[in-house]
Image (spheres, rainbow, N blue to C red):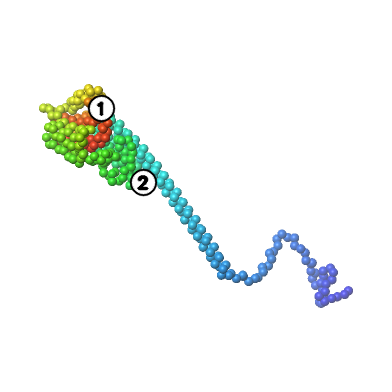
């Protein structure tokens, strides 16, 4: 048998110089699915160039900027949504306020029509007003015939909703809302056509005082005082007549006296309507029951309307008459209301 140092024979048995060695199995391909990972290869890290560092910095800055932009946009969108929701709530509150004061004013009109006065009327709103609206302001005219309700707007700062007997809700500013108005179109001393009641008349013997428009004239003729526009052909006239009797006038005598006056006018192809009682309050707090009516008739071919108001006071009845052609009645009406509001009868 031939021997070789560090040789090998067929059969896979190796020999050494000192004798046979341990048999070594031939290499067999592994069939196990679990194989050890390859040994790591030690290699030196690739150096980063300055350009690569700059590119990484730019990427980081861009990513941060995008994140900040997205957050800002989301914040803006959230703010817009909140503002929109708040605006919608305020507008809904304003709509509820308008409906409420309109219903309350309707109740006041019905009360005034039934009683001839707003004396004793207590507005009931039937809703809880929010902080943005505040407490409603209710102004009643001195003669208890007009009323205005004012409530602050939630949607528009500095604006108030105003409703009166004209039946239309209008927006007014804060100055007007705090001026004590009872007519949303005018303040208590000024009519809708800007006629003022700056001129004053007072007579202790007649027992009353009144103010009248600056563009009207006054004539005092014994027991009757005449007021009319200062024009060549006045289209309206107010007459206050204090008819005195020898004895006290009972309140139940006012109705037949006023009816007699109305029938005299209505005899001229006319009609009497809107006849009602009302309560007149004197400066000392005492009251008397008055009465008023309206008559429409024909005078010298012209259709005329008269509003007659009778107030009993001791031994006399003071009669306030406003007369105008039907075509001009409304144009002077606000001026006459302002005069009535200023009319003070001595007790």
- 22 horizontally vs 237: left or right: right
205 over 260 or under it: above or below: below
Residue picked out by circle 1? 303
Q: Position of residue 224 (x, y in %)?
A: 15, 32
Task: Report whether residue 83 is seen.
Answer: yes
Q: Position of residue 322 (x, y in %)?
A: 22, 31
Q: Position of residue 274 (x, y in %)?
A: 26, 28
231 over 257 or under it: above or below: below
Q: Residue at x 57, y 67 (%)?
A: 52
Q: Earlier in the sequence, mark 1 or mark 2?
A: 2
Q: Position of residue 147 (x, y in %)?
A: 28, 37
- Which residue, as the protein is rendered here, is positioned at the far right? 1
Distance (Cα) linking label 1 and label 2: 47 Å
In this view of the protein, which residue sits in the foreground, 154 or 58?
58
Residue picked out by circle 2? 156
Q: Quadrant of the C terminus?
A: top left
């Amino acid at each position: 048998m031939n021997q070789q140092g560090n040789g090998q024979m067929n059969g896979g048995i190796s020999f050494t110089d000192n004798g046979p060695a341990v048999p070594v199995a031939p290499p067999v391909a592994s069939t196990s699915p679990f194989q050890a990972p390859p040994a790591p290869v030690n290699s030196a890290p690739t150096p980063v160039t300055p350009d690569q560092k700059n590119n990484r910095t730019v990427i980081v800055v861009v990513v941060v900027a995008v994140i900040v932009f997205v957050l800002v946009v989301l914040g803006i969108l959230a703010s817009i949504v909140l503002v929109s929701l708040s605006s919608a709530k305020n507008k809904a509150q304003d709509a509820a306020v308008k409906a409420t004061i309109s219903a309350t004013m309707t109740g006041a009109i019905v009360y005034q029509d039934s009683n001839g006065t707003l004396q004793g009327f207590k507005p009931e709103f039937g809703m809880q007003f929010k902080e943005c609206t505040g407490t409603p302001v209710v102004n009643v005219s001195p003669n208890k015939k007009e009323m205005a309700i004012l409530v602050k707007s939630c949607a528009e700062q500095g604006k108030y909703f105003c409703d009166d007997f004209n039946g239309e809700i209008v927006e007014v500013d804060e100055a007007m809302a705090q001026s004590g108005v009872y007519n949303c179109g005018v303040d208590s001393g000024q009519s809708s056509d800007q006629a003022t009641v700056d001129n004053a008349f007072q007579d202790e013997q007649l027992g009353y005082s009144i103010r009248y428009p600056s563009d009207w004239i006054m004539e005092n003729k014994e027991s009757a005082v005449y007021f009319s526009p200062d024009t060549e052909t006045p289209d309206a006239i107010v007459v206050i007549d204090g008819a005195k009797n020898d004895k006290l006038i009972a309140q139940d005598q006012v109705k037949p006296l006023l009816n007699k006056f109305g029938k005299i006018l209505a005899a001229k192809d006319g009609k009497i309507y809107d006849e009602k009682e009302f309560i007149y309050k004197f400066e000392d707090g005492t009251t008397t029951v008055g009465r008023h009516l309206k008559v429409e008739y024909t005078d010298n071919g012209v259709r005329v309307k008269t509003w007659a108001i009778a107030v009993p006071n001791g031994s006399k009845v003071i009669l306030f008459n406003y007369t105008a052609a039907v075509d001009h009645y409304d144009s002077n009406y606000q001026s006459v209301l302002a005069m009535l509001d200023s009319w003070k009868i001595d007790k």
